[in-house]
Image (cartoon, rainbow, N blue to C red):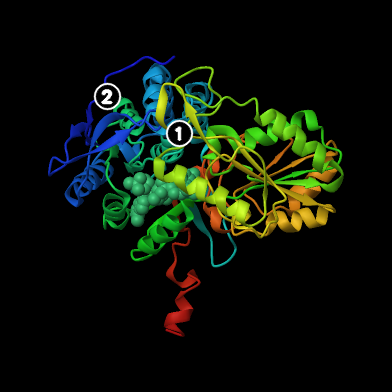
């Protein structure tokens, strides 16, 4: 059980200091497992966003931060990783009481991944080609040419409520690794752990390098992503808001990366090892109550195995214990909010109306001691067709759609028949077959005989409307740098310059 800490009022974190909202307003952060108030948080204004961006701007423009040597910067990233490990218990607690994630998952996955992310990017920073030399070309004349990779400047990160602090580090770590400064706007359901993270990080970076402003997306978020002194925008959240952010960023051509929704297809082949494929497929959709963007929400099952697979899934789903995420025995915690719970129940209703059959779940759960919380049973729909609303729209809840297929080409066609392309998966004992299917799946990540295996050295991001750009690994470093070509002529004589005769003719 995590340690209780006092969470009262949280302010913005700007220029290394806690700063209240300019109008002193706050908003409430609730625990989705209990419905109880856990903290009050500064409700930001345009003025607050401006202060945070100015702090980040001056830390970038005036400070030594951007000019640090790669090995010094790598040491800072290592120092951050140790700070996160040192403060793990408090971070896990703050994350769990606001996001509803189980302490078991957050402490065993999220925190370890965050520590490893900073260490992985530290290693990539040491190897990063900050300056590359191009070969001396015969044309247009001998010259020394370099390609430099430079930080972009002030980055704005807008983050979601499902994995608040982990996803924040997907943006903070590469931004800092490459010498940028950053302002983070966390989701209003879950700002606490990001604020704590900023405080911890600020112990080893100069003031203004990391800042957090809290408050509603439509005001604080929009002011941030349109601020003239912001150079880059990184967003994770819904496709709808992603579209809006891209439109806003377009006005001043800000570099933009987006990690958006998904409706990831998961294909079981006839020769799959069902002992692993079944629990693996349920992990793929029920981890964090289905509130993960790369969840495998559409399961394609061959005719021959259909009844066996459905029966096996229902039996296993019955073993998943829904409960208080603070309890180490809990497998699945709550839904983030009452509103989101209603949305999910409406999708379940829509599924029934469209003719899908509930194999299990579909209802709210009352958890003793958490009667005011927002819990939904692990839910499995059979007889789903890929054109149904529940198979096309991102539900972001514990709802699995099982879709029957007779030939693998049909499964691949249906798997790709979606606007999304975040992740996909295939279960088979035949590795060659797996690669053939993986090649045809339109997704940024394909898992073979596995799910949710994000790696800090692998790129993560979406095909199609699931996003633009990649996070994690050396790939993320490219998103936080810009290229500069530097040319130095090696020809001292004017007459030998290739351009001389072009403009000056016979003279
Ligand atoms: P969202 O509206 O996309 O929110 C994500 C972040 O964007 C939050 O920090 C939010 O702030 C901010 N935001 C909202 N409107 C904004 C705007 N106009 N300009 C700038 N920032 C803005 O996501 P949500 O409403 O929390 O969840 C809705 C759906 O998003 C879910 O059902 C799910 O489909 C999807 N989702 C996807 C992911 C993912 O990892 N891909 C994560 C979470 C949610 P506020 O919190 O203050 O509104
Ligand atoms: Mg929203």
Left or right: 357 as drawn, with respect to 287:
right
Residue 94, position as x, y percentages in the image: 36, 26
Q: Nearer the viewer, residue 486 or 358?
A: 358
Picture quadrant of residue 251: bottom left
Q: Is residue 152 visible?
A: no
Judge from the rendering whether residue 313 lies leftward or rightward of residue 19; answer left or right: right
Residue 7: image tag: 2
349 to the left or right of 269: left
Q: Position of residue 211 (x, y in %)?
A: 28, 38
Q: Would you say the residues marked 2 and 1 are in contact, meaning their CB atoms lie under 8 Å apart?
A: no
N-terminal of the two: label 2 or label 1?
2
Label 1, on which residue?
Answer: 166
Q: Is mark 1 within 8 Å of ligand 1?
A: no
Closer to the eye: label 2 or 1: 2
Residue 205, above or below 495: above
Q: Residues within 10 Å of mark 1 (few under 14, many from 20)?
A: many
Above or below, 490 relative to 376: below
Q: Nearer the viewer, residue 375 or 74?
A: 375
């Amino acid at each position: 059980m995590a340690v209780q800490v006092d969470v009262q009022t949280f302010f913005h974190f700007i220029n290394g200091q806690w700063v209240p909202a300019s109008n002193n307003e706050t908003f409430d952060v609730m625990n989705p497992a209990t419905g109880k108030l856990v903290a009050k948080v500064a409700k930001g204004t345009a003025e607050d966003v401006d202060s945070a961006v100015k702090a980040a701007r001056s830390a970038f423009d005036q400070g030594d931060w951007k000019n640090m040597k790669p090995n010094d910067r790598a040491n800072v990233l290592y120092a951050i990783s140790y700070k996160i490990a040192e403060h793990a218990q408090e971070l896990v607690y703050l994350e769990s009481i606001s996001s509803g994630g189980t302490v078991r998952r957050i402490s065993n996955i999220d925190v370890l991944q965050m520590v490893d992310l900073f260490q992985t990017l530290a290693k990539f920073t040491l190897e990063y080609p900050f300056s590359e030399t191009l070969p001396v070309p015969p044309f247009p004349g001998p010259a020394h040419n370099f390609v430099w990779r430079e930080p972009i400047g002030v980055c704005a990160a807008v983050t979601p409520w499902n994995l608040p602090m982990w996803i924040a580090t997907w943006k903070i770590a590469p931004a800092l690794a490459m010498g940028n400064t950053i302002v983070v706007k966390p989701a209003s359901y879950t700002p606490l752990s990001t604020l704590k993270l900023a405080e911890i990080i600020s112990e080893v970076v100069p003031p203004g390098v990391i800042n957090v402003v809290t408050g509603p997306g439509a005001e604080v978020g929009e002011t941030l992503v349109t601020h003239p002194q912001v150079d880059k925008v990184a967003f994770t959240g819904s496709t709808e808001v992603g579209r809006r952010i891209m439109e806003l960023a377009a006005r001043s051509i800000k570099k933009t990366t987006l990690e958006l929704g998904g409706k990831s297809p998961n294909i079981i082949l006839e020769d799959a090892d069902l002992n692993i494929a079944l629990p693996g497929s349920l992990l793929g959709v029920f981890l964090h109550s289905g509130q993960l963007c790369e969840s495998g929400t559409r399961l394609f099952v061959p005719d021959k195995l259909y009844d066996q697979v459905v029966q096996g899934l229902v039996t296993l789903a019955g073993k998943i214990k829904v409960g208080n995420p603070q309890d180490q025995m809990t497998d699945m915690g709550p839904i983030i909010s009452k509103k989101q719970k209603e949305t999910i129940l409406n999708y379940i209703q829509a599924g029934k109306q469209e003719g899908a059959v509930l194999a299990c779940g579909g209802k709210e759960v009352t958890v003793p001691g958490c009667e005011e919380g927002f819990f939904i049973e692990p839910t499995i729909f059979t007889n789903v067709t890929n054109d149904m609303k529940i198979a096309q729209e991102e539900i972001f809840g514990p709802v699995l759609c099982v879709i029957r297929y007779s030939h693998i080409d049909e499964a691949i066609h249906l798997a790709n028949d979606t606007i999304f392309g975040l992740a996909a998966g295939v279960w088979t004992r035949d590795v060659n077959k797996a690669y053939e299917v993986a090649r045809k799946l339109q997704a940024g990540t394909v898992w073979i005989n596995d799910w949710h295996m994000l790696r800090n050295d692998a790129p993560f991001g979406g095909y199609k409307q699931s996003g633009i750009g990649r996070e994690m690994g050396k790939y993320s470093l490219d998103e936080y740098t810009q290229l500069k070509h530097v040319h130095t002529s090696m020809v001292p004589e004017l007459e030998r310059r290739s351009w001389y005769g072009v403009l000056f003719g016979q003279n």
